[in-house]
Image: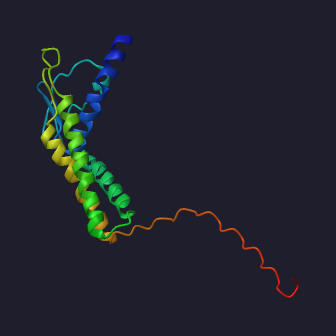
């Protein structure tokens, strides 16, 4: 039991990257098993507890998972609306955010795949290029639309400033 727990913990980073790849659209493959939102080819998977939730059939609701990265894009757009810059500057910040996010996930996906002990579940594949482009678009487009629609001004509560000290009364010149 302890060995399977440690093996599952070792697979956890790859599972998280594969999960995002599935939610963003490109999907992933473990040997002959291909799992993507538009394509599914089932089969046997390694008997590792962390892989137990893998489905056995395609589901219609999987397309709604693409709303999760898009929701992150809206949050990026709302964050960029808080910048003290014109709308074009905020849109540039959205572009940089989307590009950096896409490149980070591209690198993580490239590191996540590879050989799995040369057995029947070899190789584990996460399409790094497709994931990087999908994440970039799924974050950048909703963020840009959010900044554009709000005009770059999100309703943000101002930070509470320190209260101004009360002014001391000026000495009366008649009494002095």
Relative to 129, does residue 42 appear above or below in the rendering? Answer: above
> Which one is nearer the viewer's eye here, 164 or 8?
164
Residue at 34% in and 70% down: 150
One can see residue 8 in this view: yes
Residue 95: x and y in percent read 23, 57
Q: Locate the N terminus by quadrant.
A: top left
> Which one is nearer the viewer's eye here, 12 or 99?
99
Answer with left or right where residue 47 lies relative to residue 26.
right
Answer with left or right where residue 148 lies relative to residue 26.
right
Residue at 32% in and 51% down: 72
Residue at 32% in and 53% down: 71
One can see residue 1 in this view: no
The colour scheme applied to this rendered structure is: rainbow
Residue at 15% in and 37% down: 128
Q: Quadrant of residue 28?
A: top left
Q: Residue furthest right?
A: 175
Relative to 171, does residue 85 appear above or below in the rendering? Answer: above
Residue 48: x and y in percent read 28, 19
> Which one is nearer the viewer's eye here, 19 or 86?
86
The total number of labels drawn is: 0
Relative to 116, does residue 106 appear above or below in the rendering? Answer: below
> Which one is nearer the viewer's eye here, 25 or 160?
160
Residue 49: x and y in percent read 32, 21
Residue 107: x and y in percent read 20, 36
């Amino acid at each position: 039991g302890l060995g399977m727990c440690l093996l599952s913990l070792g697979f956890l980073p790859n599972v998280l990257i594969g999960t995002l790849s599935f939610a963003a659209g490109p999907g992933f493959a473990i040997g002959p098993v291909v799992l993507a939102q538009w394509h599914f080819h089932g089969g046997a998977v390694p008997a590792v507890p962390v892989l137990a939730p893998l489905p056995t059939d395609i589901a219609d609701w999987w397309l709604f998972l693409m709303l999760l990265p898009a929701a992150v894009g809206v949050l990026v757009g709302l964050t960029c609306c808080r910048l003290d810059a014109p709308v074009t500057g905020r849109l540039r910040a959205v572009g940089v955010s989307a590009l950096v996010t896409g490149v980070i996930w591209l690198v993580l996906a490239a590191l996540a795949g590879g050989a799995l002990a040369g057995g029947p579940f070899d190789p584990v594949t996460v399409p790094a290029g497709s994931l990087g482009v999908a994440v970039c678009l799924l974050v950048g487009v909703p963020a840009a639309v959010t900044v554009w629609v709000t005009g770059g001004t999100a309703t943000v509560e101002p930070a509470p400033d320190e209260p101004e000290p009360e002014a001391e009364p000026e000495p009366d010149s008649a009494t002095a």
